[in-house]
Structures are given as structure tokens and as C-alpha cells.
Amino acid sequence: MAIPQGIAPTETRVPFDMADAASALIDATGTIIGWTPAAERLLGYPAAEVMKQPGRMLLAAPEDAVQAEAIGSWCRAHQGWGGLGRLRHRDGRRIEVGLRISAMCDAGDDGSWLVSGIDVGSIPTWALSGSLLQAFLTGSPVGMAVLSPDLRYVWINDTLERYGGLPREERIGRRMADCLPGLDTEALEAQLRQVLRTGEPVIDYEYRGWTMAAPHREHAYSTSFFRLDNAEGRPVAVCHMVIDVTDRWRARERLALLNEAGAHIGSTLDVMRTAQELADFAVPRLADFVTVDLLDSVLRGEEPLETPGETLPAFRRAGQTSVREGCPESIAALGDTVAISPTSPLACCFFSGEALLDPLMDRSMSAWSEDPARAAKVREFGMRSLLVAPIGARGALLGVASFVRSRHPEPFEEDDLLLAEELVARAALNIDNARRFSREHAAALALQRSLLPHALSGGRAVEVASRYLPTDARNGVGGDWFDVIPLSGARVALVVGDVVGHGLNAAATMGRLRTAVHTLADMDLPPEELLAHLDDLVIRLTEEETGQEGVAAAVLGATCLYVIYDPVTQRCTMARAGHPTPAIVDPSGEVSFPALPAGPPLGLGSLPFESAELELPAGSLIALYTDGLIETCDQDIDIGLGRLSNALGQAVLPLEELCSTVIDTLLTCPQTDDVALLLARTHGLGTGHVASWDLPSDPAVVASARSLVIRQLAEWGLDELMTTTELIASELVTNAIRHGTGPIRLRLIRHDVLICEVADTSNTSPRLRHARTTDEGGRGLFLVAQLTRRWGTRYTEGGKLIWAEQDLPESA
């Protein structure tokens, strides 16, 4: 018989079942003296051809004879042999067989030998029997155990012994609870009892915990349970098979953490808040102490660094969280500048742009030799493992984040580094978005502030106070606006408007309309004419912005309210373009909303605008506002107007306090629109501030006009202005007599400035021109322009009025 090359004839136990084996009997000389039908079926030789033939005829090759002699010697010494060999079929092919050779007599006699064999190629079940089956179960990479019906271990394999961390001898005969204190053994035994009771297997039951093999490290396991029945169908044991699925569980946990991080990090467009959310989320899920340090330039909204320079830039602590209350491990408070040593892990991470893993912090401690304060914190709180990740987005560096373990028993691993990098990458994108928003929001607010008036002054005509409240931090720039514009004759214009929408388009449109109102106000147009010109401008802007929906939508449908108050006559003229009616509070405290023609919103170009005039005695209050004040989430317009009326009923309050009262009373829920509020308390100019004379259209009255002016200025104590005012009055009266018709009115107003007005019945506008040296006239208005701070013309119902202003002397 032959044995395979490399297999020594030392196996005396055959690792497979020989029940159906082919058998032959060979005598001491090696001659075949017995042959079974099974042998004929295996090798193809009938008994007649092999009987009395030497056994070596069955060898597969002549060179197998040497090995056959060795097997024979082994058999004589050990009374038998078992193993694999090669035999030759009658048709010439070779057959791998499993052999067993047994002595038929005492070892000392020259007796015969029984040779049994099976074809290992045609009977694959051979490997599942005998010692090979035992080796298969014991050495399987799947943990296996058999428990008795009372749930005590009766057998475990090597893998399960390794999982549990206890020797096999200490588990056999004991319950799970006695061997596995770190697992939920009650739940496991409940599964085993269910399988014993029902016979239904349980597949892929997952649980987590620790075992004595790794008491400080949690593992995840997948277990299947099935019942073992005897031949009569009665349960005799229950088996469970265990697979360590910790890697799969941790991968699933990482995915779940990243998914959860998306809901917790980046909830606002605030850089500091987003950095703090990263720290809050990572503790204690990943680390015991986390810090987020951002570049100071990032917190200011500036562009981050695309590549680090040779020196470390300034960092500020933007976020930090610890499992210990108050973050005692930190060397800086939120918002503080953070000093980073050039040799520290944080600096190395920032300069390299790559994450750093220091599982035992042995490298970090030596690197922090130049940072004794941080090194002292590391020793004080037992920090034992470190991760540092760069915070970068869109190819730019924003800062660094550090993750530290001190209480957590396990050091950081490569999987933890990947998780930290993914968390930081997601936070970095949100931080950069917040930085960009902060920059754009600051620019938008700066634009808004530049477009709104910086300081409102109604002079002696009105006392004013205002409030502007953008919708919220996200839509902090809107189209609401207001203004107080000084006009000629001590009058003042109050204006409030509302552009559709929010954001930069609305703010830019608001700025254009406000500038246009200023320009039209300088022309001294009455309110209805000013709105008509503004309406034409909006129509042109809408046509120019065709294709730019944001701008066109903002300007089309804008509303405006324009009010002119004259402190001399104490009368008010107003017109509106689709804007809410102003509220009027008379000196007695009664609140009313005057019946003012509505007028269409700007840009429609349909109905004409109409104005209304009413008397406002000194001490009256006029409130101009946008619809965001009266149309809130919890009230309609009528309710809002009623609440506004009640709030304005406290008009005796100082204006600033009254403004706050109105806002607090009406804005009781989150805003849905921008709010603008302008309050103006009127003052009157009495006879002590105004002097007026009606003069005939006669050149002889020019001298009288000069005398009247000198006498009035002397009465007011304005002797320093007598000469210039006398000349101004003389030129204006002369111009009215020369170019106008009918009576002339001369008026002096002592206000914040000294105003000289001359009105006539002519509609001809005066024109300033530069006379030539040979001209005898034409220098009157030129002299007026040189002697005054400003001058102009406005049209009245009966003609026109020319006015000129002079600054009062400091003594006045």
C-alpha cells in the first residue's frame, strides 16, 4: 500500500467512517487471500483476477513500493495503520482512498492483515465523521457551545473559549451568568428557553457587552440558537453559534452618529454656535474633552487661509465641552485668544493639514515641553489619548479641533480618527457657510445703515424719534425706510416707505427711492406731485430691471407716505401711495387716523395721487409706520390699529420711551415683516419768530422793505446780519417787482437759520446767470447766492416764492 508523500505513517486512528469500506485479506507474504464485492466495486477487479496475486499489483505506481514497505514495517510494530493512499483501478486510473490496516492475529505471529478502504473522492461525507468532525467543530472560527436543558455548558469550542476569556474547564457545567458578567445573560437565556420550548431556531440575535477576554472594551455579537433532538424527537440540548460583529456594529454606529450629527451641527448660521455644536456633539460620544479653535480672521468674517504661512496665525477658542462640569481642563474661555506652541500637535496638524492620532499621548507630552500650562492640565486630569483634526472647507483652513480621552478606558484608534475627521469636515462646511453669511450679512447691514439716516433732526419744527426692526437675523436687511427732510421756510418733510421683500435687493431699491425722495423734496414739490414723480421713477426702474426678478419685484408695489409740516402755519399736508394712514394724536391725547386718499402703490401708474391738509397745533403727535407694525402673526389690521391707538394714547411720555412702548405693545410674537416707526411731536413758530409784510408791486417800496428788515433784525438782536439781509431783501423784492405782477409778500423767519422770503403772483422761475462786465444788471440772484448758505424757489397756489437762508451768528 502507498502513503501520500509527506505523510508519515504515524496515524493509527482513521478520521473517517469505514462502515461501507471495501476489504481485502492479505497474508504475511503480501499475497491477496480474500476479496470482497465492495473491493471489486471500488477497484474493478473481480475476485478471480486478484486472488493469490501479490498485493503490490494494486499500487498506483512502482515508486509506491518503498512507501508500502514502510507501512508494512509500521503495521508489524504497531498492529495496524490508518491514513490516505493511492491505488490503481483496473482501467488504469488512480484513486485516492482512505485506508485502515488491522492485524488478524497476535503481533508476534506471521498472520494475515485486513485492509479496508473507501474512495474519498466519491464519498464526501467522510470528513464529517470521527475525529475530523471533532476537529472541525472545535477549531471552527464560529464560536459554538452546547448547553443542557437546564442551560449549563456541556461543550464549547476553541473560538467561544477565546471570546469568553475563561478556560473551557471553568465554564463546563456552569450557567452563562456565572461566566459572562458583562453580558445580558438573562436575555440570552430567555432566547435559549424559547428555542427549547418551541423548537424554532433564532437567527442573528445581536447584543453588546464585555467579557473577561477584554473587560474594558465593548464588543458586539451575533448569535443563532437551535435545538438538538434525539432519535425519538425529544430535546436533549440547545446549541448557540456566536460571531463577533464588533467591526460591523461600529461601522453602523459611525454611520448613525454621522447621520445624527447632521441634525445637531450647523443648526444656525452663527460661527461660534456651530463650533460649540461640534464640541457638544462629540462629548461624550467620541471624547471626554473637545476644543474647537478657529482663526481670528474667520470669526471676523474674513477670508480664511488657503495655505498656512511660516508663522502661526492668531486663534480664538470658538467651542469647548467636557464631561467635567465647567471644562476645568481648558486653558482658555470661549472667545479668548488661544496661545499655541509651534511644536504642539495642534500646530503640526494646522501646518500639515492632516489629522494627527496619538493613542497614548507619548509624542504629545514631549511636544508640549514649550507649553507648560497645557502640559500641567494633561497631567492633572489624566489625559491619555489625543486626536487633532484640521478644520478646512473649500480648500481653505479655518482652524483645528482636538479630541481628548481621560476617563474613557480605551485609546483612540484609526476608526475613531476617521469618525473625527468626518465630523470635523461636516462642521467645517457649516462653519464656512456661517462665516460667509456673517460677512454678507454684515455687508448688507452696513449697506442698510448707510442708506438709512444716521441722525434724525426736525429742527425747531418737530421733535422726532424712530425705530427700525429687521425681520430677524437671517433676513436682517429689508426695504422699510423713513426720513426727516428739512425744507425751505422752516418746514419739514416726514417720509416713510416700504419696499417689497428683504435682503440686498430690497435694501438697494430702498436706497434708490430714498435718494429720489430727497432730490424731489429739494424741488419743494407738494406731496401729491412728489409721489407722482416717484411713481414715474419706479416705472422706469421696473422697465430697466426687466429680467432681474428680484430687483423688479422689490421696486414694483413699493409704498410711501409723504408728509409736510409747516411750523409757521401749523398745518400739515400729506399724501400716500398705498401706505397705511398715519396716526394723529392731538394735544388732548385723542388718537385719530385721518381720512387720507389711499393712492395706488408705486409703479402701477394708474390713479392720480391726492393730498389732504389738516391743522396740527403745537404739541400734536404724528406717527408714521410700516404695515409690519400692525399686521403681525396674531392680529389683523383692525386689531393692530386698535392696539396702536391704545399705545399712542400715552403721548405724554418722552418720544423715545413712547417708541419703545409702541413696539413692545404691538410686537408680541416673532416678526413676519420689517418694522419702521417714526414719531414726530410738532412745535409752532409764534409771532416772536416770524415777521411778514404785504407790499405793493412798486419800485418805491424797495427802500421801505430795507427799513422793515433792519428794524426787525434789530428787534431780534441780529445786528450782524443787517447788511447782508438788507441787500438780500432788496434784490428779491426788486426781482419780484421787475418780473412779477400783483402784490408782494416779504417774510422773515427766525428759526435754526434766518430765512428771508419774497412771494409774488408770477409763475416764472428765476434763473441765476453770470452777468458780463458790460451788463448794467443781472447780478441780483448771483449776489444772493454768494451771501447765503442756500436759496431756492417753490411754487404756491398763487404764484411762486423765492427764499434764502443765512446762518445765525454764534451770539444769537
Image (cartoon, rainbow, N blue to C red):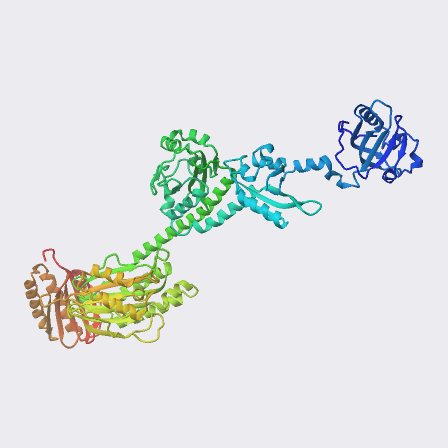
Q: Position of residue 101 (x, y in %)?
A: 81, 30
Q: Viewer-proximal residue, 54 or 7?
A: 54
Where's the N terminus, which quadrant?
Answer: top right
Compared to 226, does 762 lie above or below? below
Give the tally of numbered discs. Answer: 0
Q: Visible in this render: residue 338?
A: yes
| 309 vs 729: above or below | above
Look at the image and tell me in which quarter the C terminus lies. Answer: bottom left
Left or right of 222? Residue 397 is: left
Q: Position of residue 44 (x, y in %)?
A: 88, 39
* Residue nearer the viewer, 277 or 191: 191
Q: Position of residue 797 (x, y in %)?
A: 20, 75
Q: Nearer the viewer, residue 62 or 129?
A: 129
**Residue 161's image quarter?**
top right
| Image position of 723 (left or right of 622) | left
Res 306 seen here: no
Residue 583: image location, x then y, percent: 24, 69
Is residue 554 toward the left or the right of residue 421 in the image?
left
Name the one closer to the observer, 566 or 264: 264
Residue drawn at (70%, 47%), measured in percent from left and top? Answer: 232
Residue 64 picture quarter: top right
